[in-house]
Image: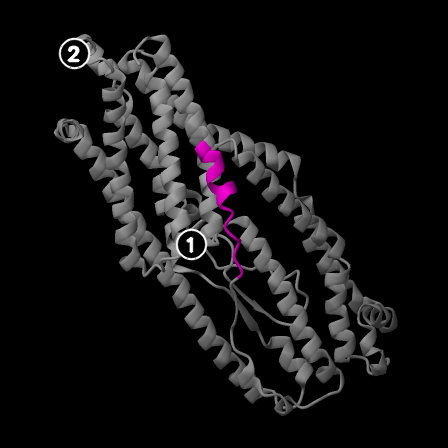
Amino acid sequence: MYLLLFKNFIRSQSAYLGMLFLLLSGLVSIFVGRQFIEKQKANIEHTAIYQKEHIERYTGYIEKDLGLLLYYLKFGLVNTTDNLNALSIGQRDVNPSIQSLTIRNLEGQKYDTDLQNPVSLLLGSLDLGFVIIFLFPLVIISYCYNLLSEEKEESTWILLSVQSQTPFRILFKKFMVRFAVITGVLLFLIVLAIPILDLRINGALAGFVLVSLFYIIVWFALSFWVVSWNKSSRAGAAGLLCFWIVLTIILPAVLNHFILSRYPLPEALDTAIEQREAYHEKWDTDQKPTIDKFYRHYPQFRSYGYPKETFNWLWYYAMQQMGDDESKNQSDQLKAKLWKREEMSRTLSYFVPGLHVQFQVSDLTGSGLADQLRFTQAAEHFHEGKRLLFYPKIFANEPTGSINWKQFKLEYYNERSKINWLAMLGPLLLFSLLFYYLGSVNFRKQTVL
């Protein structure tokens, strides 16, 4: 029976067009992802070379004044890009994956990013995650919207009902044939992506496959429910398209607007203004209050006292430190609100399958807001470590040659979220069971079972 139903399905023009559409869009998304990964790797290689040449050049120019040298020197921290990121680019094309920082004030540096064409950022990237979340459901709709209504409109359902004691099983098998075809296309694209993107076969890749598969099951279960309404083909298509528009476009937009209004971010501008004013106004004030505040922050440096020169590096870097310290309140509020946005978005996503899948694949590929916030925190620790390393040497007027500059190479951050299988797959399974149950109830009422 399955073979006969498959042959009957595959002969239809819509089957070929649907598979071709998914395969072409999937192939394009894979190569777009590869291009993105290659660009990221090239940026990392260029940054590593630049940092090495940058340090060599400046240490050659400035041989005695360590404070002046470290005014210019930049040290890089890289948010490691796994090749799996090619399947879901997420926010990696907006947020910086490389932080090149001096030991001067941090707030003015940590949100620096590459120059991008704003039009391309507005349109976004066609990655495989986008294809799965937005395009796969459309093909599922085209395959399933008329499974029952077509039989009735062609007057074959009555004949089928007379010849079979359980016509529902035939209908269910038709769903399973289409599910097998869609799943086959998904697995084919994943298998194809493994050598093209040089993906590692690990838990993250398995998670990506499973969450995609469960999302496909949700849409088949939803189609099953809509078909159980026993309406015309036109009504079935309209109903499923309305669900697609609501679940993939309208609800995410409404939730995003709600979260933005719930947690506005005036602190972003306040932080920038505060750190600039806190630094620049120190040029017009006495040095001692600035140094006193610096010593309260770093009591271990009190032994360096209060230099009498009009300009000295202790006072200068104390000014830089005050830019960060006096904007810390706004900065902490900004980070807290960003985390609240992330937590609320994640909680609400449990009720929107497409949004939930987007969060999960972003976690698996390290391309979401949570990953970026953790990377920003790692950059803060990285910056603080460099300050604590160089401050004593600057204040003691050590020569630049006393430091082995070859040891300062790019450093890498590679912390990722742990996979919570229940939180990742549970909501999708519940949606699938709910829609299947509603459809089964409708069919029982119609005595189709």
Q: Please tell me in which quadrant of the rendered image residue 150 appears.
A: top left
Give how far across and how far down residue 371 sits, in percent: 54, 54
Residue, x 52% and y 57% (percent of image)? Answer: 416
Res. 307 in view:
no
Quadrant of the rendering where the C terminus is positioned: top left
Q: What secondary structure characterizes most of the magenta part? A: helix
First to last magenta residue range: 415-429
Looking at the rendered structure, the kind of residue marked 1 is Gly
Looking at the rendered structure, the kind of residue marked 2 is Gln
Residues marked 2 and 1 touching at CB (< 8 Å) = no
Q: Secondary structure at mark 1?
A: helix
| Residue 295 appears left or right of 183 | right
Quadrant of the rendering where the N terminus is positioned: top left
Q: Identify residue for label 2.
A: 163
Q: In the rendered image of this protein, does residue 271 appear above or below residue 234?
A: below
Q: Nearer the viewer, residue 2 or 95?
A: 2
